[in-house]
Amino acid sequence: MMTTSIPGEFDSMHRVNTTHPMSIATAPGEPVRLTGLAPVFDTGIRCLILGSFPSPASLAAQQYYGHRQNHFWRLLGAILAEPLPELPYAERIQRVLVHRIGIWDVYRACVRPGALDADIRAGEANDLDALIAQAPALERICFNGRCAAKFAPRLKRHKLEIHILPSSSPAYTLAFATKLERWRAAIRHGNATPN
């Protein structure tokens, strides 16, 4: 069985170690406990986008928003004027960090039969406070959907802007143009150009 990194344990590049297993073995007959992904992070981020927990496709690929129908990369690409959906994953991550945006999820681990946020059970939260403490330039947190936004009250004490965005999931059937308008208003505010 593989071990997971300790939340807040950062390597010399200020990114959390990425030795995360996709699932944690449980006793026979018990539901499989899934473990999420390490954050996309460096100390210069000004905006942190928090989702709920990776989809089965994302866990299998070990990539954020790995389901090809998810609107996340298309939304962010349009906002940042970057061809993110067409780039290899490693380049997407580099471009996002250039724009001083981080990505993580509110849940570190959970039991979830299927792919819907509504099915998340026995969720274990990520140490969001530890990550925020390592990001002195952070100005805003954007929650990708209502499930993730349940964590907003926990973070108000940090005195950051908090935005609750419509979910990028294709299961949330709001028109793409409307999602884009709302995402652009939250993310572009103060994040106009990369440094």
Image: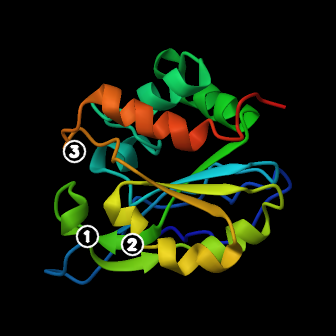
- Dividing the picture into quadrants, the one containing residue 8 is bottom right
- For marks 2 and 1, the one nearer the N-term is 1
Residue that label 3 marks: 172
| Mark 2 vs mark 1, CA separation in Å | 13 Å
Circle 1 crowding by C-alpha within 10 Å: few under 14, some 14–19, many from 20:
some
Residue 120 is marked as 1
Q: As shown in the figure, which amino acid type bears the numbered disc 3? A: Tyr
Name the N-terminal-most of marks 3 and 2: 2
Q: Is residue 5 above or below residue 145?
A: below
Q: Which of labels 2 and 1 is toward the front?
A: 2
Q: Nearer the viewer, residue 3 or 128?
A: 128
Q: What kind of residue is marked 1?
A: Ile
What residue is at 61 percent from the left and 71 percent from the top? 128
Residue 7 x, y percent position in the rendering: 63, 72
The quarter in which the N terminus is drawn is bottom left
The numbered mark at residue 141 is: none
- Kindly report the distance in space between the C-alpha atoms of the residues bearing marks 3 and 2: 17 Å
**Residue placed most toward the observer, 80 or 120:** 80
In this view, 45 is above or below 116: above
Residue shown at 65% from the left, 34% from the top? 96
From the viewer's side, name the closer residue of 64 and 189.
Answer: 189
From the top left corner, tell me how far across and down residue 132 is, in percent.
71, 67
Number of on-image labels? 3
- Asked which secondary structure carries label 1, the reply is loop
The quadrant of the picture occupied by the C terminus is top right
In the image as oriented, which residue stretches furthest toward the left? 29
Residue hosting label 2: 150
Report whether residue 164 is seen: yes
Is 78 situated left or right of 115 in this image?
right
Q: Residue at x 74, y 48 (%)?
A: 45
Residue 100 position, x and y percent, is 73, 41
